[in-house]
Image (cartoon, helix red, strand yellow):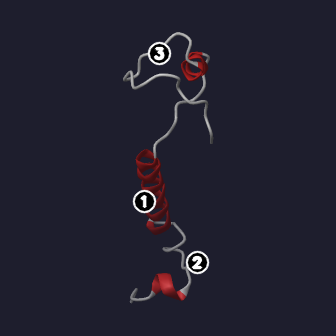
Amino acid sequence: MATTPHSHGPNFGRRVDGCPRCAELTAGAPPVRWACSRAKRDEALALRALDAHFAPGGPHALGKCGPVCTFGDW
């Protein structure tokens, strides 16, 4: 997702008059998401999926998994 670049140096969250990107942000454009926050979000989604899979009444408990998932369940 490409965004309009700022026309100034770092201002630590303060908007600058005349900057096209600051004007977009003021108008309601979403801020850029950094890769580290995406990685944390993806990890949280993966953990939630695992919890749902192994929950009582989930696919694992109902035997809907393949042999790789159920290996070692005696």
Where is the N terminus found, in terms of image quarters? top right
The reply, left or right, for residue 48 in relation to residue 3 is left
The residue wearing badge 3 is: 15
> Does residue 17 sit above or below 56 in this rendering?
above
Q: Nearest to the eye among marks 1 and 2: give it.
A: 1
The span from disc 2 to disc 3 (Cα, nearest Å) is 54 Å
Badge 1 or badge 3: first in the primary sequence: 3
> Does residue 56 sit above or below 6 in this rendering?
below
Task: Name the residue nearer the viewer: 56 or 18.
Answer: 18
Badge 2 or badge 3: first in the primary sequence: 3
* Secondary structure category for the residue under label 2: loop
Residue sitting at 44 percent across and 88 percent down?
A: 71
Task: Name the residue nearer the viewer: 42 or 62.
Answer: 42
Amino acid marked by disc 2: Lys
* Secondary structure category for the residue under label 3: loop
Residue 61: give its label: none
Residue sitting at 48 percent across and 81 percent down?
A: 69
The span from disc 1 to disc 2 (Cα, nearest Å) is 19 Å
The spot of residue 64 in percent (x, y) is: 58, 77
Q: Which quarter of the picture shows residue 47?
A: bottom left
Amino acid marked by disc 1: Leu
